[in-house]
Image (spheres, rainbow, N blue to C red):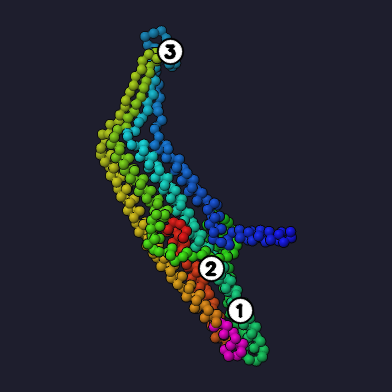
Amino acid sequence: MLMALLVAGALAATAAHGAELGETVQGLLEYARTQNPELAAMRDEADAAAQRVQPAGALPDPVLRVEMMNINNYGNDAGFNLLPSKVGETKYTLMQTLPAWGKRDLRREVAAADVQQATARTAGAWTELAMKIKTSYARYYLAAGNERLTREILDLMARVEQIAQARYAGGLVAQQDAIRAQIEQTTMRSELIMQESEKRQVRARLNSLLAREATAPLAEPLALRPLPAASTLDAAALAQRARANNPQLLAEEARVQGAEKNRELTRRNRLPDMTLGIFPSQMGSRITTWGVMVEVNIPLQQTTRRSQEAESEAMLSATRARSQALANQLVGDLGENLAGLDAALSTESLIANQSQPQSELSLRSALAAYENGKLDFTALLEAQRQIRKTRQDRLKAQVEAQMRLAEIERIVGEDL
């Protein structure tokens, strides 16, 4: 029983630890998706646009007209009156306007295209926000990684100082070695101050993207996202996915559809709208006569309509050109970021497989040689600086790959 409680407690602690905001980029994305006010506003705007589709294609409200004639009761003994049964005659006219054939459907389709635009803009806002969070998290990981690396090297230099002090006490080296080790540690402590400041700045940036207070706590970043397989990074396939899924392109395509429907609607304005009506007439307390009416607007202002049609045609051409320009730009950005990702991956692989093992071996050899009096302190410092630079370069390459991946996913419109 006790063992079961201990296991349950350990699992609960692990779950709580894993739930800390800031440890993983996925947790930040999930938080932002539900808490970001800009996204919530755009979702509400998309919902509002959806509510405009049905009214766009609905008939206009009917009109009721009441006409009272001979309200002064001329020709009889009754005086002025406004009651329908007390005037000479009251006519009730009920009218309904009927747009020309096809206009209601076109208006509904224009409104539906607006809904598609609003939905795509919401998706575009999310992909943009997700990209910013991913890149900011990568910078956060870089800042934290640099800080950890500096502390590790600081500990190493403290050990080197102890070795130098021991050798100086034995009269094997000059006191200058110990002093230089202390100077190196002081320099690193100064760098730690700058790195901590940089980490606070990135943390504030992340909190801003999450709609939190700038000083709100965030856990230390644990790990970068795994990179996709090389087979998923084919430029042609990704370009095709971008054309199909990129929210900005989808919004432009919806805009093109709306412009096409608006052009057709403008052309339909050549056809007249019709108003139908029925009117009973009341004399005294009885309905005595019935009538019907037909009203048609006459589209005589052809110059105005031709200008409107030319405007809609020009807007359609501009929208198509803008959509094509955006597609070209996205494909170009995709190629640029794929090249950057490939370079970052190659750099990281080279450092991991060659530079870093060589630097670590060089440092171990230098430490052993210095302890044995076979190497001077300057060479040891150089070996220490080289291993530090190698680790920093590898960390930068990893973070660069993450930032390039975030840009590619923004362009493609989905995670890879």
Mark 3 lies on residue: 285
Distance from disc 2 to disc 1, alpha carbons, whole Å, reads: 21 Å
The spot of residue 344 in percent (x, y) is 45, 70
The spot of residue 113 in percent (x, y) is 39, 45
Q: Are marks 2 and 1 in contact (CB under 8 Å)?
A: no
Task: Determine which quarter of the picture holds residue 275.
Answer: top left
Indicate the secondary structure of the residue bearing disc 1. helix
Is 39 magenta? The answer is no
Mark 2 lies on residue: 142
Mark toward the viewer: 3 or 1 = 1
**Which image quarter is the N terminus in?**
bottom right
The amino acid pointed to by label 3 is Ser
The residue lying at 28 percent from left, 44 percent from top is 310
The amino acid pointed to by label 1 is Leu
Residue furthest front in the image: 1
The range drawn in magenta is 362-375
Numbered tag placed on residue 156 in the rendering: 1
Within 10 Å of disc 3 (Cα), the crowding (few <14, some 14-19, many 20+) is few
